[in-house]
């Protein structure tokens, strides 16, 4: 019976305690590669970490490197959210924290790439956020956490 009580306590703690979302980056200085990507770690539908990689030989290599960096930090549920095979352009990462219609706090990220401009990369990041976080509306706001030319 004590084992069941402890399991219930752990389950309640997991469901009720907010998870601190973090972000980081892995940037490859070799600019000859054209693979870039961002990968999200999730728990119970909430985005809890993001890793982005620029300049890998391919988008697949960038996804794998970002996943490995998140695994090294202890994250398990990893989802490639956006990638690019463009050798040069802009990358914008945005983050939002909002409350769902059921009252749950959510953290979500958007990742956008563009060869045209940083404004287009930000627009692509908003579209990416909207595609993965159906409850998010632009009126809920977001902040740019990374804007970079590569």
Image (cartoon, rainbow, N blue to C red):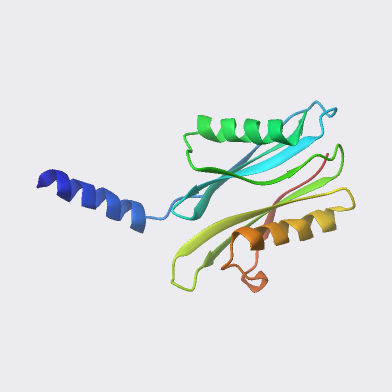
In x, y percent, where is residue 84?
77, 43
Would residue 99 appear left or right of 130 to someone viewing this image? left
In x, y percent, where is residue 1?
9, 47
Q: Going 85% across and 27% down the picture, which residue do you hit? A: 32
Quarter location, residue 136:
bottom right
In this view of the protein, which residue sits in the foreground, 80 or 25? 80
Quarter location, residue 30:
top right
Q: Going 63% across and 32% down the picture, which residue do you hit? A: 64
In x, y percent, where is residue 106?
51, 61
Would residue 86 appear left or right of 20 to someone viewing this image? right
In x, y percent, where is residue 73?
50, 33
Query: Which residue appears farthest toward the left when viewing the image?
Result: 1
What is the quadrant of the C terminus in the image? top right
Would residue 137 appear left or right of 114 to someone viewing this image? left
Query: Which residue appears farthest toward the right when viewing the image?
Result: 116
Quarter location, residue 28:
top right
Query: Which residue appears farthest toward the front when viewing the image?
Result: 60
Q: Going 27% across and 48% down the picture, which residue do you hit? A: 10
Q: Going 48% across and 38% down the picture, which residue do you hit? A: 75
> Total marks drawn?
0
Position of residue 61 relative to residue 107, above or below, is above
Position of residue 75 relative to residue 82, above or below, is above
In this view of the protein, which residue sits in the foreground, 124 or 85? 85
């Amino acid at each position: 019976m004590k084992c069941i009580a402890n399991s219930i306590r752990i389950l309640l703690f997991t469901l009720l305690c907010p998870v601190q979302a973090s972000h980081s980056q892995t940037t490859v200085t070799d600019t000859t590669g054209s693979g870039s990507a961002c990968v999200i770690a999730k728990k119970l539908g909430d985005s809890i970490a993001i890793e982005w990689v620029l300049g890998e030989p391919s988008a697949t290599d960038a996804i794998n490197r970002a996943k490995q960096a998140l695994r090294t930090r202890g994250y398990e549920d990893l989802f490639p959210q956006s990638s690019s095979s463009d050798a040069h352009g802009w990358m914008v990462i945005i983050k939002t924290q909002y409350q769902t219609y059921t009252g749950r706090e959510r953290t979500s990220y958007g990742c956008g790439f563009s060869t045209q401009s940083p404004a287009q990369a930000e627009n692509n990041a908003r579209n990416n956020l909207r595609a993965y976080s159906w409850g998010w509306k632009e009126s809920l706001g977001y902040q740019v956490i990374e804007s970079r030319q590569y």
